[in-house]
Amino acid sequence: MGDAWHGGRAAPPRGTDEEELAALLADYGARWSIAYTDWGTWEATPRPIASAVVTADSPDELRSKIQGEELGFLRQLFPGWEFFVGVDRLPYGRRLNTSPPVTLRGEDPVDLRDEILRYMRLTR
């Protein structure tokens, strides 16, 4: 786990759930640089452009905030859709004002984007 921490940041505090932290890094480590700061918060910086920083007090809170940031780009791409993270921690998209209702999910926001594009191609 040592190479996941950047810039000489502090090591995670004792008592950090190692499995939860490993799952967080597995889910987001390729797209986000994740670190425990000297101020006692968790920090995620998007890669490769560090234009925004997300901070949290725990890995679980950081996971929620990262998912919210990632869903933000879908809101911009698809204004007629609503996006949320389900209890299974997967991102969902719901097309507004449709009958029958349309709800799609993906493994991550990029996969959800692809699912929406596939749905739009099939329903033209």
Image (spheres, rainbow, N blue to C red):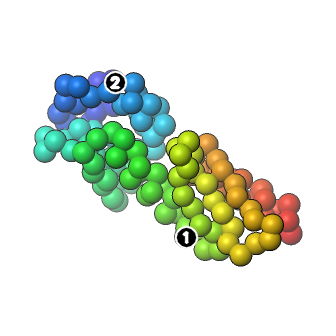
Residue 72: image location, x then y, percent: 49, 63
- Residue indicated by mark 2: 18
Question: Whole-Å distance between the Cαs marked 1 and 2?
Answer: 35 Å
Quadrant the N terminus occupies: top left
Residue 108's place in the image compared with 4, above or below, is below
Compared across the picture, whether 34 is left or right of 108 comes to left
Residue 9: image location, x then y, percent: 19, 36
User: Dot 2 lies on which element?
Assistant: helix
Question: Is the residue marked by circle 1 packed among few (<14), some (14-19), or many (20+) residues within 10 Å?
Answer: few
Q: Foreground: 78 or 57?
A: 57
Residue at 39% over, 24% down: 19
Quadrant the C terminus occupies: bottom right
Going from N to C along the chain, the mark reached first, 1 or 2, is 2
**Residue 33 seen from this side:** no
Which numbered disc, 1 or 2, marks the residue closer to the eye?
Answer: 2
Residue 87: image location, x then y, percent: 53, 46
Quarter of the view holding residue 90: top right
Residue at 36% over, 31% down: 21
Residue at 55% over, 50% down: 86
Mark 2: amino acid: Glu
Residue at 59% over, 67% down: 82
| Total numbered circles | 2
* Marking on residue 76: 1
Mark 1: amino acid: Gln
Residue 121's place in the image compared with 29, above or below, is below
Quarter of the view holding residue 75: bottom right
Q: Foreground: 21 or 28?
A: 21
Compared across the picture, whether 71 is left or right of 12 comes to right
User: Dot 1 lies on which element?
Assistant: helix
Residue 119: image location, x then y, percent: 78, 59
